[in-house]
Image (cartoon, grey):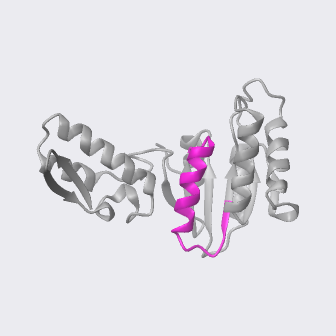
Amino acid sequence: MITLIEHRRDTSLLLAEEIPATMEGRIRVNIANAMAAAAATFAQDVQLEYIRNALRTFTATFFQSPGRFNLLEVDGRRVLLDYCHNVAGLESMADFVKRMDADRTIAMIALPGDRSDADISAFGRLAASTFDEIVIREDANPRGRKRGEVAELLVEAIAAGGQNGDAVKVVLDEIEAARAAIARAERNDLVILMADKPALVFEQLTGRTS
């Protein structure tokens, strides 16, 4: 229950699972976002029913929140499209994955080139412990790195985290990597696509425009 506390008065707002953007409470980071939004609007004297209605109608679909936990169906597979670009974001993603009860998880991952080697290493190690299979792509703009450099660092970090061999594949092009990740999935698996250009990936995979 999301509860507003003002002085000594507690006001129950709504259950977290009633907020579509939390996917029945599975996306914990969006529960935190909802709490922050509720607190900010309550402080501006917005009526409680307006706050409740806004939270009940805000979803994590591509059209309301592009690139933020967008759950799609592509070729009969569950596919999550998200712009996850740092270790904190991957920690939230890892928590979400645990709550999804998928047979396996296959992820397309990458990091911007302006991240430190230490951050890239931490990201890769966490990805290794989170996903069953990994496809590594690279941003179109390497941000000062050589082409393929970030991917190489991720491969090393993932191997250090216990994943290597056939479970890890490098496909630098984003769209090709997304298709490669989906092709590895079975019906009860979950595919995570960490996209640099979510609108382009969405259009290419679904045939719909944003």
Query: What range of the chain is rendered magenta?
Result: 83-106
Quadrant housing the N terminus: bottom left
Q: Please state the horizontal and vertical placement of residue 151, each as a whole percent of the image.
A: 80, 42
Q: Is residue 91 above or below residue 42?
A: below
- Nearest the eye: 36 or 206: 36
Instruction: Note whether 105 is above or below 111 in the view shown.
Output: below
User: Residue at (62%, 41%) from the top-left corner?
Assistant: 86
Along the line of sight, the residue nearer the viewer: 196 or 173: 196
Q: Is residue 111 left or right of residue 91?
A: right
Left or right relative to 100: residue 154? right
Residue at figure coordinates x 69%, y 49% from the top left? 109
Any part of residue 96 in sight: yes
Q: Is residue 35 above or below residue 191?
A: above
Membership of 105 in magenta stretch: yes
Residue at the extreme front of the image, as rendered: 8
Q: Nearer the viewer, residue 64 or 49?
A: 49
Magenta segment includes 30? no
Q: Is residue 206 visible?
A: no
191 relative to 113, above or below: below
Instruction: From the top left corner, tell me how far across and down residue 93 is, in percent.
Output: 56, 55
Question: Could you say which quadrant of the image residue 189 lies in?
Answer: bottom right
Q: Position of residue 174 (x, y in %)?
A: 70, 44
Whether residue 23 sits left or right of residue 19 in the image: it is right
Residue 81 x %, y %: 55, 52
The residue at the far top in this view is 144
Q: Residue at x 32, y 43 (%)?
A: 36
**How many numbered circles are shown?**
0
Nearer the observer, 76 or 104: 104
Q: Residue at x 68, y 68 (%)?
A: 185
Looking at this rendering, what residue extends furthest in the right direction? 165
